[in-house]
Image: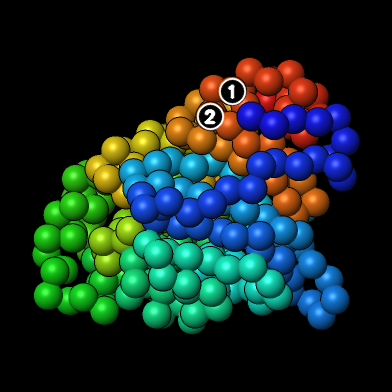
Amino acid sequence: MTTTTDAAETQVPRETPTADNVVFLDDVVAGYLPGVNILNGATLTAAKGELIGIIGPNGAGKSTMLKAIFGQVKIRSGRVVLNGEDITGLRANKLVAKGVGFVPQTNNVFPSLTIAENLQMGGYQDQKNYASRVDFVTSIFPDLAKRLQQRAGSLSGGERQMVAMGRALMMDPHVLLLDEPSAGLSPSRQDEAFLRVSEINKAGVTTIMVEQNARRCLQICDRGYVLDQGRDAYTGTGRELLNDPKVIGLYLGTLGA
């Protein structure tokens, strides 16, 4: 793990893709407005079966990194690679077909549709495998199996998060991108959300998760990245980052306590 006391001068060793990489971000510069970059040379690798956590201060570019992978922000330089294929800038529908699932933080279900209909929307590009994918989703989220005909708009925040993750899993993704799955949930629901993320990952789904709850994120992830000013300031295993006093003091504050 590489550290420094000056975020502006932090240099994390340049990562290179390997045969087992599912996702590789290579020195990505990206932003929403002309001339304004949110990511400033961000790099990330996720190997098959890994759970990757992305943490850091507000405004560091964490959610933007996920959106760059999912084609929702303009990439000005660098590239995004999925299973050895350059997918930089592809539209979301093509990325879903190639095996990228994305769960945004908000507005992540269709509230007027039932749970079953939400799952159908998630698997619309692969309807022949609908039944088997519903079986998989309800094995991860057994509470949904009993309530498939309930409208998503009547669910609690934690239940909606289950539906959103379940819908993203309907296409049997190679990688699942989660943007703050514990946001806005009660402490008990947060614990359940992290448990479900772990179960999804243990079922073989490579997972990249952005989280403000740094402690819980680092407790369950294989490797973590701390972003600062749109680039990787620190990287290491979850345990290394969780116990590094410089990471806590410089970037996480009470979030790491």
Which residue matches tag 1? 240
Q: Position of residue 164 (x, y in %)?
A: 40, 59
| Three-letter residue code for mark 1 | Glu
| Label disc, if present, on residue 65 of the rendered structure | none
What quarter of the picture does the N terminus occupy? top right
Q: Position of residue 47 (x, y in %)?
A: 40, 47
Residues packed near mark 1 inside 10 Å, few (<14), some (14 to 19) or many (20 plus)? some
- Rendered image quadrant of residue 239: top right
Looking at the picture, tell me which residue is in the foreground, 119 or 186: 119
Alpha carbons under labels 1 and 2: distance apart: 5 Å
Looking at the picture, tell me which residue is in the foreground, 102 or 24: 24
Q: Is residue 120 left or right of residue 237?
A: left
1 and 2 marks in contact (CB < 8 Å)? yes
What quarter of the picture does the C terminus occupy? top right
Q: Is residue 215 left or right of residue 250?
A: left
Q: Position of residue 205 (x, y in %)?
A: 32, 49
- Rendered image quadrant of residue 9: top right
Residues packed near mark 2 inside 10 Å, few (<14), some (14 to 19) or many (20 plus)? some
- Residue at image x 47%, y 72%? 86
SS assignment at label 2? strand
Which residue matches tag 2? 237
Up/down of 146 relative to 80, above or below: above
| Three-letter residue code for mark 2 | Thr
- Residue at image x 88%, y 36%? 6
